[in-house]
Each structure stands twice: as C-alpha cells, then as structure tokens.
Image (cartoon, helix red, strand yellow):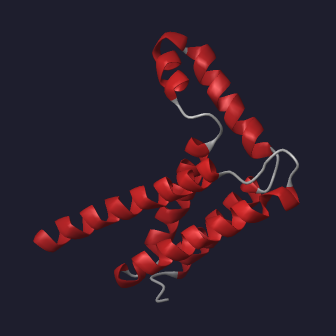
Amino acid sequence: MVLRNRAYSAGAIVAIVFTTALMWSDTAISWWSGIIEFALRINSTATQEVLDSRPSGDADLHALVWGGCAVAVGFAVNWKKLLFAFVTLFGWTVCVEIAQPWFTTMRSRQLSDLLGNCVGIMSVLVAAEIVKQVRVRR
C-alpha cells in the first residue's frame, strides 16, 4: 500500500488500535449509554423522537467509530488504494467482531454491529468518491 504521509498513517493506526480496544472492552456500551441518556435528559422534547427510532444496541456507535477510522485511513492512503484499504478495514472489523467475546463478557457477536461497521465505512467511501469526482471536474 502506498502511504501518503507518516503522520496520517500513524493517526490511522492509532485510531484503529483505539477503536479495537474500545470494541473489546466493556466501556463502549457504558459510554454510549451515558451519551444517549444525557441526550434524553438535556432536551427530551428535541431528542426523544429521534432516539426512540434509533436501532437497539450500539450499531450507530459502530458506524460512527469505524467511519472515523475510515476517514483516518482515507487520509493515510493514496486514492488508487482507497477501495482496497477500506475493504481491508472492513475485514479487520469482522475479525474484531468475531473475537469480541474473548475479551469482554458484556459484548457478543452481532450482525447489527457488522452492519454498523459497514455503514460507517461505506459512508466515508461514498463521500470520498464524491470529493474525487468534484476534484476531477475542476
């Protein structure tokens, strides 16, 4: 893989390692639950309807954190290798999800989490392709 910049590469590695550790710990659920509860308490009239319609579990957290990792990876690799890098990242998320029960008792393998991972990474891929097309047209 052709890397663009060592700082971006280091950032991507740190993001992936941090996210992997978060997914393999018991703290991810408690942090995310705390954020959701805070949103419900702080302005329930504005947030109640949205939070009630969100999927159960933490698939939205998965989309958010793995999407963030995809952004970091996107900055680290060359445009030509972007699709390969994102497929590799998704493969890593599958490994993380499979290994999750070995590292934590509160989390288990869930298809919804994998779908969240995929949505996060695919969203960044779509955004990157739009940016690429806009740059080509200029």
Q: Residue furthest bottom?
A: 2
Q: Residue furthest top?
A: 45
Q: Residue furthest left?
A: 138
x 52%, y 16%: residue: 48
Task: List x then y, in percent, for residue 82.
Answer: 41, 77
Task: List x then y, in percent, for residue 61.
Answer: 60, 44
Residue closer to the observer: 66 or 11:
66
Residue 131 visible? The answer is: yes
| Image mark count | 0
x 62%, y 52%: residue: 111
Q: Would you place residue 127 above or below residue 83 in this image?
A: above
Task: List x then y, in percent, for residue 79.
Answer: 35, 79
Residue closer to the observer: 104 or 37:
104
Residue 138 visible? The answer is: no
The answer to whether 131 appears left or right of 21 in the picture is: left
- Quadrant containing the C terminus is bottom left
Residue closer to the observer: 39 or 102:
102
Task: List x then y, in percent, for residue 121.
Answer: 48, 60
x 46%, y 80%: residue: 84
Q: Would you place residue 89 above or below residue 97 in this image?
A: below
Task: Place residue 96 in its image quadrant.
Answer: bottom right
Residue closer to the observer: 111 or 83:
111
The answer to whether 52 appears left or right of 132 in the picture is: right
x 49%, y 89%: residue: 1
